Structure formats: C-alpha cells, structure tokens
Image (cartoon, rainbow, N blue to C red):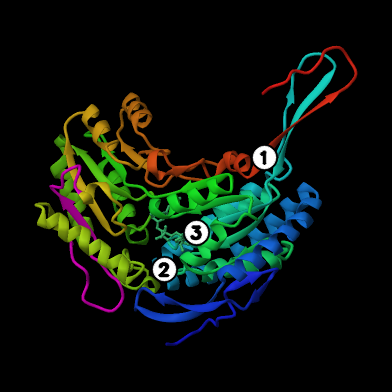
Amino acid sequence: MSSDVTESHGVYIDGAFQDGEGVFEVEDPSTGEAFASVAEAGQRGVDAAIDSAREAQQEWIALAPSERGRILRDFADAIREHADELATVITRENGRPIGQSKGMMQSTPGYLEYYAGATDKIEGETIPVPGGQHAFTRREPLGVSAQILPWNAPVLLTARGVAPALAAGNAVVVKPAPEAPLGITRMAELGTEAGLPPGLFNVVPGGAETGEALATSDRVDEITFTGSVATGKIVGKAAVENVLPMALELGGKSPAVIFDDADLDDALGGALQAISFISGQVCFATTRIFVQSDVYEEFREMLLDAVEAMEIGPGADNPDIGPLISGDGLAKVERYVSEAVNNGSEASVGGQALDRDGYFFEPTVIEGAGDRDAISCEEVFGPVVNLYEFESESEAIRRANDTEYGLYATVWTNTLDRAHRVANAIEAGSVMVNQYAGSYPQTPFGGYKNSGIGREKGFQAIDHYTQLKTINIDIGGEGGGAYDG
Ligand code: NAD
C-alpha cells in the first residue's frame, strides 16, 4: 500500500493531531487501492475530544458575538484559499469528479459567511405579561454538538452543521465517515489556523464503534446525524436515551414530475445532474422521473441519448460519472438493477458494472418498474434513474408521494398555478420548480417522513443549536404571577 497520509493525521483534538486507538485505511474508489492510513479515535479519543470541546466552548462564549463572527469569516476565507487542495483530497477519498468537488468547495465558505453574520443577531423577545413584571427570552448555546457525517459531501456537510453550531456559541465534535475523513480533518486544522480556539472543532475519525461512542455519550448536548435511515434510527434512540435535541438528515427517493408543457431541455439537465452528482450517491438525488404521456417518448429519447453519451472515469480526470464509493456500494447497485431486470424491468441504457479496477457502474435508465418494486422504493445510491409515464396531475402527485421518504422533489411545468399546486401537494422538505439544485445556506433543508427530523440551514438551524430561556423579573408593580403545572 502506498500511504501518503500518516496515521497521526486522524484524530484532531485541542487544535492538534493526536494518536488514536488503532488505524484504518482510506481507499481511492477510482482504483480500489488504499492510499492513506488514519488514526481511529475510539472511546478514548471521543472522551478526550468532548473534554476539550467543553473547555473551548467556555472560551468561545466569553468572546463578543461580533468577534466570533469575525473568526468564522476568517475561517471561510481560509477554506476559500485552500479550496483546490480540499477538492483534490475529497476527489481522492470519495471519487467525486474533480469539477464537482471544486464547485462544492466554492459553495462551502458560504455557510460560514452566512452564519458569521448571525452571531450578533441571535435575539430573544419581550413577552407581554400582566402587571409589574418584565418577561423576556434569551437564546443560549447548548454546549457541545456531536456531528456524525456521511462520506458523499464531507466538507460541505460539515460546514452545513458546524457553522450554525459555532455561530450559536457551541463547540463541536465531528465524526467523519471512515471512507472520507481527510478533507474534514484538514478543514478543522484550517479552522484553528484561522483563529478558532483549540478544542472548539474536534474531529474523531473512525467507524461505527467511534460513532456509537459519540452518539451514546451523556456528556454531549446535541446530536446532528447525517446518513442512512437505518443508522439514523440507532443514533436517534441514543439521543432520546440521554434526552438530547437531535437533527436527523437521512435518505431520499426523490421524484421529478415533468409535465407536457415543461421545457424538456431544462428537465433533461436536471436528470443528468441527478445521475452525475457523485454518481447518484446523493441524499436528494432524483431517482424517480415521472413524465406526462404526451411527451414521454420525446423525453425518453433525449434522456437515453444523453445518458449513453456520458463519460465514465476516475474522479481526477473530471468525467461525467466517477466511481461508486466502495466494493459494497457497487455490489448493492448491481443487486438492485439485476433484481429489477429479473422482475421484468428493462435497463434501457446501462445496467452493468465496468470490468476495470475501481468501483464503476454504467449510468442507467430503468423502465417498466412497478411503483412498489424495490428499485422504486429503496435508496439504490448509484447512477440509476427510473422512468415512469403518467396521465394526469393527480396521478403524478399520488405516485410521487407513494414513498416512505420525503426529502426533495422537482416539478417541471410552465403553468404557474399548476407549479404552485403540485409543489404544495408534494410531501417533501424541499421542492424545486424548473431547476434541480436550488438550495442555499439561507434556505431550510430537511426531510418529511423517514427522510429525517429537524431542519438544517437558515435561521432554523440557529434555533436548533440554541435553547430558549424565559426570565421574568418582578419590577415591583401590580399583578402576581401564575403557576403552570
Ligand atoms: P451511514 O448511515 O452508513 O453512515 C453515516 C455515519 O454514521 C458514518 O459516519 C458512520 O460511520 C456512522 N455510523 C455507523 N454506525 C453508527 C452507529 N451505530 N452509531 C453512530 N454512528 C454510526 O451512511 P453513509 O453510507 O455514510 O451515507 C449515505 C447515506 O447518507 C444515504 O442514506 C444518504 O441519503 C444519506 N445522506 C443524507 C443527507 C441529508 O442531508 N439528508 C446528506 C448526505 C447523505
């Protein structure tokens, strides 16, 4: 194995890299070769990270809010200055085409900048109560936020959770996925260099055991989990056990609904982005495309031609489609597609793994799947979309909502009232009209149904990372207090 990152570059506590309890390897999915060995935090690392975070949080909240904002802005600048370096690391560890990784690194500082501007705008309210009393609320930080991350957009998703948590006055302990820890540890190091107090942003790399040590700790004050529904349920139970606020950002099976008056070129662009963004391994990826019958054939041909022409290759070569994350990820996609084909669906284009090193699967369009087939209901997490034909608006809404998930949806139509009606009727946390990816730090994001609990982004995240205190002062006038409970 060629290892160009040493094991000491793993556990990041108190503003420095530390030894871990063991070592794990990170693979390049474009080759299947391990290229780095990283220290695993384990229980000891998690405990030390929480100790460090608790201390640093006291230092952090002693700073003036505007000073905290200034440091977060410096952190954003540091990420922007190192955007190419971080993009290269991310592409190496999760296989994402380098152009996509660079694009993501352009958006990442925006989270820190948005929440840097929030530090001195976290306000309470004055409450009208009877008589001579003065009742008001304060939004106070929770303390230490535990953040457990997936591998598909590691640095961006870390910024999404860490920026509001820090802006609200908390410290964080971040557990990256074992497939992609390197971008996040480098990000934390840049944070310290930019002026975050050592210990405010700790990173505890490792697998499920390290994640469990963090999620079950009774010394953290909040848990933000981003990942699969199955793991989210485990983490959610641990949060309830310790009576902690939690945000669960889970999976999706997002519909696109394309009406016969839509701009089909735009709708095609959305479908291709869904397939190509990290090979479809995205929580909000469109995976079920419903097309109105009048334009089904026309759209189908456009889609099949475009998908056939997509280039596949190593992320560093910036193809349309990079590799899947791992051998297990590839086997899962192969299993879903072959089961669908065995059950009577057709892979109208694609449908096979590539016979080469690394974990590559052809971009694939499935036709003829039933709405209750596994490929229509479960997260495949690969460059695979299902195409379905529908007749009426009510049918499209019913079928789009026929899923346990509710993270994201797109609607394609040029009829204004229909756009509003359908967007309102779809059961999802975010609905885009005539565009695929229209999400910003200031627009709330999260899931209906099994796609999650709580909302990231926007000022909703500041509410999430604070707790509300009511203070009522007797200022000596008329009137007495009331007792509740
Ligand atoms: P995963 O659930 O397997 O792992 C997520 C994280 O949980 C990893 O860091 C993992 O090590 C950790 N973990 C595993 N077992 C644990 C345990 N028992 N206790 C605590 N932590 C544990 O998910 P993944 O494969 O890394 O990511 C893919 C999933 O993430 C997909 O379902 C995708 O839809 C979802 N996702 C959701 C969003 C969102 O914002 N809603 C964003 C990206 C990805």
Q: Quadrant of residue 186?
A: bottom right
Q: Is residue 407 visible?
A: no
Query: In which quadrant will I find the N terminus?
Result: bottom left
Instruction: Determine whether 354 is above or below 463 in the image.
Output: below
Q: CA distance from mark 1 to mark 3?
A: 23 Å
Lower sequence index among marks 1 and 3: 3
**Apparent side of residue 43 relative to residue 480 in the rendered image (left or right):** left
As helix, strand or loop, the secondary structure at mark 3 comes to loop
- Comparing marks 3 and 2, which lies closer to the viewer? 3
Q: Quadrant of the C terminus?
A: top right
- Amino acid identity at mark 1: Gln
In the picture of the structure, the residue carrying the numbered disc 3 is: 149
| Residue 270, visible in the rendered structure | yes
Kindly identify which residue carries mark 1: 467
Q: Residue furthest right?
A: 476
The type of residue carrying mark 3 is Leu
Q: Nearer the viewer, mark 2 or mark 1?
A: 1
State yes or no: discs 3 and 2 in contact (Cβ < 8 Å). Answer: no
Name which of mark 2 and mark 1 comes first in the sequence.
2
Q: Give 339 or 382, whichever is nearer the viewer.
A: 339
Q: Which residues are magenta?
A: 349-373
| Helix, strand or loop at mark 2 | helix
Report the residue at 73% width, 54% height from top: 70
* Helix, strand or loop status at disc 1: strand
Q: Please name the residue shown 58% across and 44% down the image.
A: 245
Task: Find out if the beta carbon at label 3 lies less than 8 Å from the nearest ligand 1 atom.
Answer: yes
Q: How many numbered discs sit on the rendered protein? A: 3
Q: Give how far across and how far down residue 45 sits, in percent.
A: 61, 70
Q: Which mark is residue 94?
A: 2
Q: Amino acid at mark 2?
A: Asn
Some atom of ligand 1 lies within 8 Å of the CB belonging to the residue at label 1: no
Against 446, residue 397 (above or below) is above
